[in-house]
Amino acid sequence: MQWVACFSFALLSALYSVPVSAQRAGLRAHLQWERPAGSTCISGELLQRRVEDLLGRSAFVPARAADLRLHGVIEQRGDRWFASLAVIGEDGGPRAVRELHAEQDCAALNPALVVVLATLFDAPSEPGELEAGHERERDADGAGGDARLRLALGASGNLTLGLLPGLSAGGSVLLALRFAQLWPLWIDVSLWPAASQLDVAGRGARLQAAQLGAALCPELVGSARTGLALCAGGQAVAIRAQGDGLAVERAAVRGLGQLTAELALQLELWPSVHARLGLGAALALGRPRFYYERADGGRRILHRPAWIGGALRLGFIIGAR
């Protein structure tokens, strides 16, 4: 533990300019955290939660409310992992920088990072508390890290091209599930209100759609406040057409399967509240036809979904990113 003490002392020495009133009230910091996408490295959100669990209090806040700003980066060099943590001064430059390293597995850095940050915020009154905290973190990582299921809920407005006639507006309810270090699973239920498709004689149909989708969304790049993910999955769509202006106005429902890909950007607005912007495309696995029969026995095609469609989604998420 000698390196932990040295590292903590170097960071603590950078706190002399922090107001005494802030230290008495409990130091609050903003952490900007970067890690390689798809790695076993601890996320900024999980690191902050573990530090706060060890401290028994809230310690991390948005930058505008922070007494101290921290910037951490994890990177791989060869077969070794390096974590650097810096205290950022008012001029935006680092006041203290220290580096840790681990062999082979990035997750081996987790216990040390948690203990060092906890010591920075609130050094334990008893020497044994630090070692006990270190051992608790080691045991947790040995058991596979954070095993809790994390949920996030959200809603969005959507613009879709190719599913219904023209540019269609709709809405979605979103649910995100994440377990340990697995990729998040996003589930959405979406509805599009009726869009009309009529011929020059005013005959046609009103079409509407309902959709159930699921996608895995690994994060490509991310920090404590933002993240860019690539989502890949599928959708099951039901399209309903109601005759309009016809002698017999029947209704018909057709099913449609789609493969989807979406780039999703999330930006923290407040703690646990994120804005989400998605730009995606869908590949249809079939193109059901909606038509009416003319008096001469022929068929007038009103609508067929496009083979490739596009979608723009803007909404918000409440919960863990």
Image: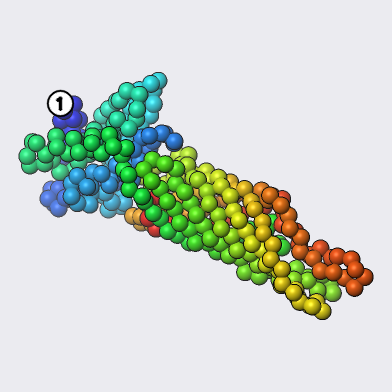
Q: Which is nearer the eye, 124 or 238?
A: 238
Tell me which residue sits at (34%, 27%) in the image.
105
Q: Is residue 295 above or below residue 236?
A: below
Mark 1 = which residue? 2
Tell me which residue sits at (90%, 68%) in the image.
297
The picture places residue 28, in percent across and down from the top left corner, at 22, 49
Q: Which is nearer the eye, 153 or 96?
A: 153
The picture places residue 273, in percent across and down from the top left corner, at 38, 57
Q: Residues within 10 Å of mark 1 (few under 14, many from 20)?
A: few
Callout 1 amino acid: Gln
Q: Is residue 315 above or below residue 261?
A: below
Is 110 left or right of 251, judged from the image as shown?
A: left
Tell me which residue sits at (16%, 28%) in the image.
1
The picture places residue 185, in percent across and down from the top left corner, at 47, 49
Callout 1: SS: helix
Q: Quadrant of residue 157?
A: bottom right
